[in-house]
Image (tube, rainbow, N blue to C red):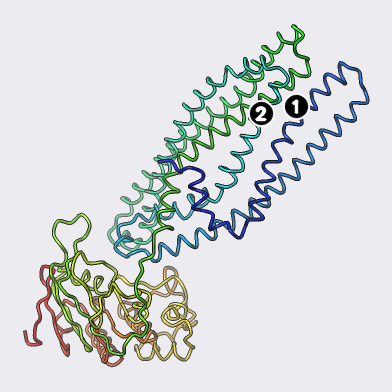
Amino acid sequence: MKLSRIAVLKNIRRYVKKSKVQVAALVIAGLLTAPVMLISPYIVNILINEVMYGGRVQGFAIVVAGLLGVYILRFILDLISLDAGNKVLNRFTYKLRAHLWGKLLRMPFAQYEQSDTGDYKMRMLDDVDSLGNFIKDQVVDYLYHLLIIAGTLLICFSVNARMTVLCLLIVPLVFVLNILIGRGTRNINEKIRTANQAYFTFEHNSLQNWKEIKIQNTEEIFLNQYKKHRKKLAKLGYTEIRFWFFREIFTDFKANYLTKAFVCVLGAFFVMAGSLTAGELVMFSELFGLLFTSLDGINSKNVDLRVKSPYYQRIFDLVNRPAQVRARLQDVPDRLLLEAKDICYRYPGAEKPAISHTCGRFEPGITVITGPNGCGKTTLLKVLTGLYAPESGEVFINGEPLSQYSMREFYRASGIILQEAALFNDTLRNNLLLADPGATDEQLWEACRKAELDGVLRSLEDGLDTLAGERGLRLSGGQKQRFLIAQAILKHPRFLILDEATSAVDNASRKEIRKTVEREFGGIPVVMTAHVSQELEGAHQIYQMKDGALTPQTAGE
């Protein structure tokens, strides 16, 4: 798949609207560089014909002034191009990355779970940078090369049309060689990108699961996998260097032999025949050097566009994905009633549904869903909270389908603590403020007190400013669950979801956490999953889950 330049420009114009002046400066500077480049060969022609052969010594001043003027003009244009290009690139990549990041954060949870972390990292880094250079590389430079080609041919035909036609006979040979090298370069670039994507995913997952690697004594396995990835990248890198070397050799061959030597040898016969001067021959050589450089540039830009079009398209598919239009949840009532009616959900590629024709009614009070591991409890909670879209059936809030609500408003009204919930690599204070950005220190400590965690946190040297996450404080299982409950308390949810909230704690901590939940959230629907009998005590209603279906039970069953 190849996108046209016009199609790409249509997709990126929203990101350069506020950089119109810089874009205009970049385009004008780039286009003015072409005629400036064509002046130097003409000045060399004057130097040889009029000064060296014509004896016009005063022409030295014209030649020196002309060459100096060309240098100064090129310096100014390059400076303008560099400054404008950097401003356009930085603003463009900032806006695109922010938009892309927002789309990724709002992506459906089920889709995210099926995604490749390395692929998204490549899109956010390499692909965005490449797209950021699109205006300079694929528009300004492309037009510059077209102007150089048109200008050189116009001058050469005006000087000697027959000589120009003969010199153009080697163009097909150059294009054939360009295509062969370009094809190899394109293939190796695609292989390198795929290998990098796999490596980034492996690296991310390995660092994220470092503890599991240690406790399972699998360091050697992961070290060997790391070496395998790096060896593959090293091998591909060596192949890329070889293609680069051949491309450089071929470029030098064209510049110093195929073009200059051919033009000079052919032009010598025209000079001897008197139809071309020595100065015009040198000018021809310089102009054809520019011509073939620009032909290479055009070919390189076309190959680059063909290679990167699939990456651009994946970015555009994501940022242009229409937002799901839903009615805004204006006023969330104080009392919520969650209902699941005939819910079916099947994981992509699975033959058997994880949830099959499941119905449940979750009123204010504590509802416990119990059942063995793998029976579908967590999957059902993810459907209830909108993280998974059911294959059939519907989730209702106070009789209204969940699909009709703004999910942002829905999540504002909810407290959700999943089994795999984690703290961000930030301070405890900032982790708490995620639930209520406007909360005061007094409110933060009060939430921790209600979650029976303030004693532990006050004993820390830095208190709430203690770093949590990868390199900070390591909370125990019970402490982590209490911290997440403190977040929920700050949020003042209208309903609460707890997925195996006490699975990693001892009996004493389990009882304390349960007491906190009953005390702080007793007036709202609380849905808990559990596989231990202690969690059934005091529950308002109990559901047994088996083979993806719910069965109501009484407390005594």
Task: Using the image as rendered, state which of residue 513 and residue 215 is in the foreground.
Answer: 513
Residue type, mark 1 in image: Pro
Vertical relation: 139 (above or below) 439: above
| Cα–Cα gap, marks 2 and 1 | 10 Å
Tell me residue 557's x, y (percent). 6, 84
Is any atom of residue 169 visible in this view? yes
Q: Which mark is residue 71?
A: none
Residue 488 figure quarter: bottom left
Residue underneath mark 2: 290
- In the image, which disc is placed on residue 41? 1
Considering only order in the chain, which callout, 1 or 2, is on the residue closer to the N terminus? Answer: 1
Q: Is residue 463 above or below residue 197?
A: below
Determine the residue located farthest toward the left in the rendered image: 557
Q: Residue furthest top?
A: 273
Mark 1 element type = helix
Q: Residue at the spot x=14%, y=75% of the render?
A: 359
Please report the residue visible at 10 percent of the width from the left and 87 percent of the height from the top.
Answer: 555
Which of the 4 quarters of the picture holds residue 556? bottom left
Query: Judging from the image, what secondary structure is the residue with disc 2 in?
Result: helix
